Amino acid sequence: MKDGFPTQDSQFNDLRFQLSEIPHRYGPNVHILSDPFLLSHLAQLCAEDTVQPIINELVTTLYSSLLKTIVNQEFPKRRAQIRTRMAALHPEGVFQGPIIDPSIPTVTVNLARAGTLPSHICYTALNYFMNPKIVRQDHISIGRTTDADEKVTGSQVSGHKIGGDVEGAIVIFPDPMGATGSTLAKALDLYKTRGKALKYISIHCIVTPEYLRTIKTLHPDLNVYAIRLDRGLSAPDVLNSIPGTHWDRERGLNDKHYIVPGGGGFGEIMNNAYI
């Protein structure tokens, strides 16, 4: 007993989370998960016959699981002393151990429209274990710009509601498809004028080598998490290599900058709006 509390259990002295990810050569800030559970759900999400209401249920499962992984790996922890309901009967009825530090400001960003449901899932979950007074959801209306050949030329912000600065905050971008990187790069440009965040994290279902190249070039501080890397248009020898070995030859986008094998337009199906 010390300071009215029991001695901390040694099992919590070196508690670590083990991230399961595939080997690659894209750099330390990129994490492509090795998770059969998530890969199985994502395969069903991308299947030709998956429509409403199943698609939203699958997205909910995927992002609930992804958020758990990201929080375990990236969020600061602190030691807590919390009285349990047994404390009235036993002085040892106090939990002493690590918890996620709830005092860190946290922002989840809705990149409309495919990012709307994923952001809402993350925002709702964060409010349960972080201090809800400093958890925020922002909204950005942003879309691809294309040329006459329907190739992506960049992204355009048509409006946003950003509820404050991001000083010392963890800023999360739950964006299902990391295709060209232009949308997320534009959003990061916007946030980096609003204070120095503790860290930026993007959470994706699928990313391409082209997306990773853009992001690593423009925003190397971004921590990228994805369930799957799609490089299906690469040559056979590239597909037989560790991802990132022949980064300049890896290809996951077709001529109109859609992901292959990919899953088609998530935003269209999630919203039943094919425009």
Image (cartoon, helix red, strand yellow):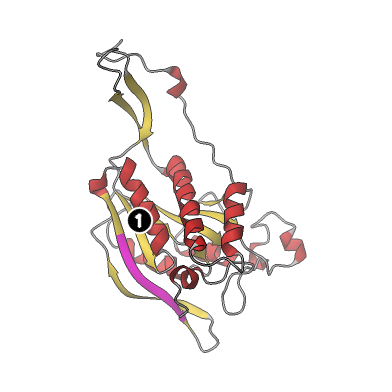
Answer with left or right where residue 162 lies relative to residue 179.
left
Q: Residue at x 44, y 48 (%)?
A: 67
Q: Is residue 34 visible?
A: no
Per the image, the residue denoted by label 1 is: 108
Is residue 219 depicted above or below 150 in this figure?
Answer: above
Quarter of the picture holding the N terminus: top left
Instruction: Residue 26: name its quadrant.
Output: bottom right
- Quarter of the image for residue 119 reads bottom left
Position of residue 4 in the picture relative to residue 98 (left or right): left
- Residue at x 49% of width, y 70% of height: 269
- Give the magenta range: 138-145
Q: Nearer the viewer, residue 12 or 271?
A: 271
Instruction: Based on the picture, tell me whether residue 93 belongs to the magenta stretch.
Output: no
Q: Residue furthest top?
A: 1
Label 1's element?
strand
Q: Nearer the viewer, residue 127 or 73?
A: 127
The spot of residue 55 in percent (x, y) is: 51, 62
Residue 86: x %, y % from top left: 30, 18
Is 143 inside the magenta-drawn segment?
yes
Q: Residue furthest bottom?
A: 148
Query: Most prominent secondary structure in the magenta stretch?
Result: strand
Residue 181 x %, y %: 49, 67
Look at 26% across and 46% down and name the residue there. 132
Residue 190 visible in rendering: yes
Does residue 65 sit above or below 239 in this rendering? Answer: above
Three-letter amino acid code at the position of disc 1:
Thr
Residue 84 vs residue 5, the one in the foreground = 84
Residue 92 lies, in percent from the top left, at 32, 14
